[in-house]
Image: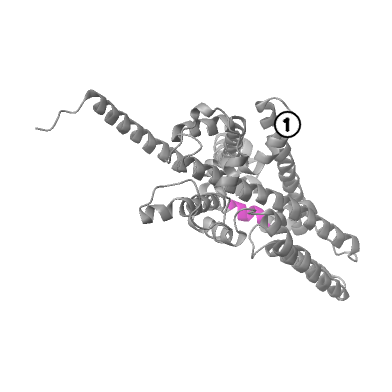
Amino acid sequence: MPEPESPFERARLGWWLYVAALAVVAGYIAYSFVGILVLGVFGYYATRPIYRELRGVIDSDGLVATATIVLVLGPILLLLAYTGFRVFSEIGQLVGESGQQQLLGGALEALTDQQRQAVLSAVENPQQLAQQPQQTFETLLQTGGQAFSAVAGGLLLVSLAVTLTYFLLENGDELAEGFRELVGGRETTAYSYATTVDEDLESVFFGNFLFVVAMSIVAAAAYWATNLLAPAPLAVPMVPVLAVLTGVASLIPIVVGKVIYLPVVGYLAVQALQGNRAHLAFVGGVLVAYFFVLDILPQTFVQPLLTGRTVNPLLLLFAYLLGPILFGWYGFFLMPILFVLLLEAVRIALPELLHGEPLTRRLSMGEDVGADPGDVQESVPEGDSTGDTPGDQ
């Protein structure tokens, strides 16, 4: 007869079932808010080196995390406010009164037929606002509610992502210590895999942040130099905004700044055609200069130096291109994370699993593709040695 199951084993089975159920719930929550999670993780790795530098000056994890968020997020918020103001002003000057009416008509297409008729009637006959106050109030309330929901949803997503970044910055050391104790110490394969993934993600995302900053500065200099040398009335509008957009577009190795500087050149060409056609020669020279400064320079020198310092930038190309196609806007951040997780699993664990050999924390292949686990662990502080136990996991 089989031996009866002991209370100890039944308790372990119950706990495993309970933990599995919690894992399913956690997975569902992560799936439902994946955009917030990947933005928060991106913000953490993109700002962690800055946090570590500030921690040497400020003796408080909370204050350092706050200072890091403010230093990085503050300029972005100012840029967004400036962008909205300039875009509104430029559109108003460009289209004039008749164009504004056309834009208003295009915006009304997003409303229902009843809401559209109510708005048009109110514009054509303002007196009805006093004659039918209840209907007018309901229409304005519904339209305003839709706009408010869209704006509030975006602000909430960004706010929660920033809050997650703050939490990870402030509690990163405690989370790392807890994970080390959970998997059995520094000498385990799981810990080696996690620290290598951690190093690769910091390399990718902080490298991306540095690259965007560097190319934004280069693009701003190029656009301001264009305005300085351009004959009147040729001018590049909204230079700071276009410079940052060029820096962001430069993340994609093949695309780089083309999607921004080519329309800028086209805008200058239209200005030349409407004014003095002899200025087209200057526009041609600007195109050549932009090609070398905003296309060849980032791909040849800046990008290999800053982005993916431990991960080959050409391998990340597929992650950046396929991520938005597969997952939507957040795929631009999610796909590199998944790519690094897959890459390090192949480098560290897959050969031993296929050959039936014991797992180790050493690399079995791809020494030149990502970070080296041995070098990474040497840079990690030892911490409390009581949590370290030898052996593979």
Left of 177 or right of it: where is 8?
left
Magenta stretch, main secondary structure class: helix
**Amino acid type shown at disc 1:** Gly
Vertical comparison of 119 with 253: above or below: above
Q: Which residues are magenta?
A: 102-108
Q: Quadrant of residue 75?
A: top right
For the point 32% across and 32% down, which residue is it?
16
Whether the magenta-drawn stretch holds residue 105 is answered as yes
Return the residue at label 1.
Answer: 56
Rendering colour mode: one colour
Residue 66 sits above or below residue 338 on the image: above
Q: Residue furthest top?
A: 7
Q: Where does the N terminus fall, quadrant-wise?
A: top left
Q: Is residue 85 visible?
A: yes
**Res. 261 in view:** no
Q: Is residue 249 left or right of residue 86?
A: left
Q: Position of residue 140 (x, y in %)?
A: 59, 39
Kindly give the residue lying farthest to the front in the view shown.
390
Report the front residue among 63 and 388.
Answer: 388
Report helix, strand or loop for mark 1: loop
Residue 259 on the magenta span: no
Residue 166 in the image, given as x and y percentages of width and height: 62, 33
Percent x, y of residue 299: 70, 63
Q: What residue is at 74 percent from the left and 55 percent from the top? A: 215
Instruction: Looking at the picture, tell me which residue is in the foreground, 90 or 138.
Output: 90
**Image check: 97 left or right of 5?**
right
